[in-house]
Image (cartoon, rainbow, N blue to C red):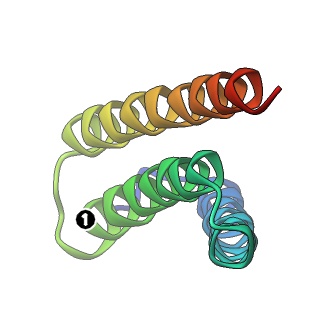
Amino acid sequence: MNGDIPLIVIGFKTVTVLLGGLITYFAVRAALKTRATGLTYLAVGFGTITVGSLVAGVADQLFDLPTDVALIFENALTAVGFVIIAYSLYVTSRSALVTR
């Protein structure tokens, strides 16, 4: 376990993963219920961000991956997740224009 990380950071990471998982779960349920493409991408985006946070934290704490490598991995997946979320909004706005 990496002793350089304060306990408060681990606590915040845990809250982030739990809330990210909850948001992803609700987005998946909404996507399945409505069959909206935008909601599907939204779920994938939040899932990507959440998985990145989880994997980086586990790799840093349990597998002694250097903290800077874990942060690079986490931030890369966060960026990819935000791109997917932005695309979900684009798909939603395009489909709203088509149905009008």
Q: In which quarter of the image is the C terminus?
A: top right
Circle 1: element type = helix
**Residue 86 sits in which quadrant?**
top right
Q: In this view, does 85 lie to the left or right of 16?
A: left
What amino acid is labelled 1 in the image? Ala
13 or 20: nearer the viewer? 20
Residue at x 45% of width, y 26% of height: 83
Residue at x 46% of width, y 55% of height: 53
Residue at x 63% of width, y 77% of height: 32
Where residue 89 appears, as percent x and y from the top left, is 66, 29
Q: How crowded is mark 1: few (under 14 residues within 10 Å), some or many (20 or more)?
A: some
Residue at x 68% of width, y 34% of height: 92
47 or 53: nearer the viewer? 47
4 or 67: nearer the viewer? 67
**Residue 81 sits in which quadrant?**
top left
> Is 93 located above or below residue 4 in the figure?
above
20 or 39: nearer the viewer? 39
Where residue 58 appears, as percent x and y from the top left, is 34, 70
Q: Is residue 24 left or right of residue 67?
A: right
Which residue lies under the disc numbered 1? 59
Where residue 14 appears, as percent x and y from the top left, is 64, 69
